[in-house]
Amino acid sequence: MISRKKIIYPVNAALRKYLKTYQRERKLPVSYPQLKFYTESLPLIDHKGKDTLWETVMYPQDQIADIHNGLKQVYAMLKAGGDIKVQKHLYIERIDYCSFGNSHPFRIKIVNSYNDVHDYFYIKIPDASRVYGLELEHILSPNQLNYIVDEHTLVEEHIAGIPGDVFLPLYSTRPEFNPKRIAKEFVKFNERCFVRLLGDMRAYNFVFDITPDFDDFQFRIRAIDFDQQFFEGSLKIYLPQYFKENSPYVDMALKHFNKDVMLQYQQEERALITRRIKEERYRLTDLRDVLVKDEISTTEKIKQLGFELAEYYQDPVFGRCTSMGELIDRSLKRVLITTHIKSTL
């Protein structure tokens, strides 16, 4: 069971030093606490008239120009290496706030005045769990991520895609979409999450990125919520297959694949992770050195997860781990040294 309210862990000095080394920490012109001082808000309703759980916020007239200019600078830092020339034709159309969830994000809608093309980015509370999740996603997954951390602020780029809970009823039955390719990607995504201990990947916490190929469509599932990076104690939290919201994807995989095919896709994903571990071994070593000393979960949850992983893998080393950092370190080492795996689905 997932904790109703996850503890927000601060970004400590060692993690900040790591982030600065790898150009993730920068001084920002606008901070999360500054954005909290809005004066009015209105519920944001979607095109179907449904409440989105976001509210559009407004600021005093004498502050709007400074806030908007600062946000455009943040966007330039996130997307263009800080080149302020890209700001000239950009404007902030809307600032939305969501009180739902752990990170209480602000979502910024920024528009190109030349062609009306818009983009989003997010400003959040800098939770260490989320920062570790973003960094591991960048290093170990097929997807690179842009984010910036400041003292009281975390800035993230928007991850484009169709949410998993929206994709299923609207897109999965389209005749041009091969359900075997959808199921294959879910098996691989399930394995990615388990190896790097990313939890709570229910359908609304990941998106589908769809790419037309010359003879078919390719699918990539991307995580969009990293609050539950190695925090919970139950092993099942790190396997998307166990969430009822994902049952249709599990059923799709069981319908189209036998055990041998699933093992093939799991091994393919582990091989890709192995390559990324080797390519980024120095960076991962630096991150591990910070992680093993950081307090990012409770003693009870660490013990529970260590016991369950030891039982699952028949590997007593997990049971002797005393931090989430040691558990993820052992999980990644198993990918490097173990060729035999068993099917999780």
Image (cartoon, rainbow, N blue to C red):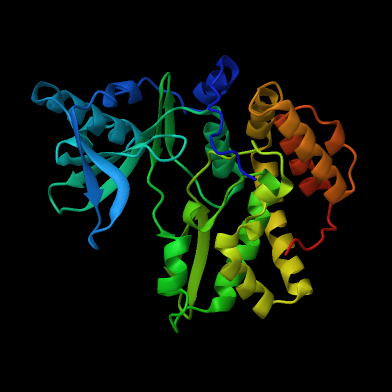
- Is residue 3 toward the left or the right of residue 74 in the image? right
Q: Position of residue 19 (x, y in %)?
A: 52, 25
Q: Position of residue 277 (x, y in %)?
A: 68, 43
x 76%, y 42%: residue: 331
Picture quarter with the N terminus:
top right
- Is residue 59 toward the left or the right of residue 181 in the image? left
- Is residue 116 toward the left or the right of residue 319 in the image? left
x 72%, y 37%: residue: 328
Picture quarter with the C terminus:
bottom right
Quadrant for residue 252, please give it.
bottom right
Q: Where is residue 101 in the image (x, y as percent from the top left)?
A: 45, 39
Residue 287 to residue 197: above or below: above
- Is residue 120 toward the left or the right of residue 186 in the image? left
- The outermost residue toward the bottom is 175
Quadrant for residue 35, please give it.
top left
- The outermost residue toward the top is 13
Residue 13 to residue 3: above or below: above
